[in-house]
Image (spheres, rainbow, N blue to C red):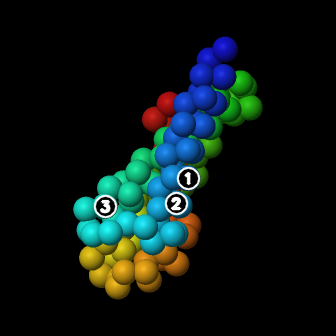
Amino acid sequence: MPQMVALYNGMGAGAAGAIAAVELFGNKTQGATQLIVTLLGAVIGSVSLSGSLIAWAKLDGVLKQPFRVKGQQIFNGLVLLVTLASAAFSSFGAPHGENTPLLIGCSSHAPSSSAY
């Protein structure tokens, strides 16, 4: 039963990320405020989705031990900085309509497995 709750939570987060992606890739945001809110929705949705999938895998026994690599926290920090930099560039640096290629692959970072 807890696994199902984790999956349901992940589906809501995935839907939030998908809605933000449609808004971003369709260039439907007008103004910096809407763009920033949409970018935040995309980041929060993608991080929540990945966290929910990790929780499901741990609860279901798919992940039996933490997956850690040397330098993982540094890597996670760098991914977070790239995500924030791409969001800032998309919000303030790129002309309207030219921000979507930068966002591909940069809108999420994997949470550390030590947080669970």
Q: Residues within 10 Å of mark 2 (few under 14, many from 20)?
A: many
Q: Residues within 10 Å of mark 3 (few under 14, many from 20)?
A: some
Type of amino acid under label 3: Gln
Query: Percent from the top left, x then y, of residue 23?
Result: 47, 62
Type of amino acid under label 1: Ala
Query: Percent from the top left, x then y, of residue 114?
Result: 49, 37
Which residue does the numbered mark 1 point to in the structure image?
Answer: 18
Which residue does the numbered mark 3 point to in the structure image?
Answer: 34
Vertical placement of residue 91 versus 76, above or below:
below
Q: Which residue is drawn at 55% across and 44% down?
A: 15
Vertical placement of residue 3 versus 49, above or below:
above
Type of amino acid under label 2: Ala
Q: Give how far apart the Cα atoms at labels 3 and 2 are.
A: 13 Å
Q: Which mark is residue 37?
A: none
Vertical placement of residue 107 versus 5, above or below:
below
- Residue 61, image quadrant: top right
Which residue does the numbered mark 2 point to in the structure image?
Answer: 21
Residue 99 shown left or right of residue 93 in the figure: right
Q: Residues within 10 Å of mark 1 (few under 14, many from 20)?
A: some
Q: Do the residues labelled 1 and 3 touch (CB within 8 Å)?
A: no
Can residue 93 be seen at all in this image of the molecule?
yes
Element at label 1: helix
Q: Which residue is drawn at 45% across and 72% down?
A: 27
What is the number of callouts on the image?
Answer: 3
Q: Are marks 2 and 1 in contact (CB under 8 Å)?
A: yes
Residue 60 shown left or right of residue 69 in the figure: right
- Residue 2, image quadrant: top right
Residue 68 shown left or right of residue 99 in the figure: right
Can residue 77 be seen at all in this image of the molecule?
no
Query: Percent from the top left, x then y, of residue 9?
Result: 55, 31
N-terminal-most mark, 3 or 2: 2
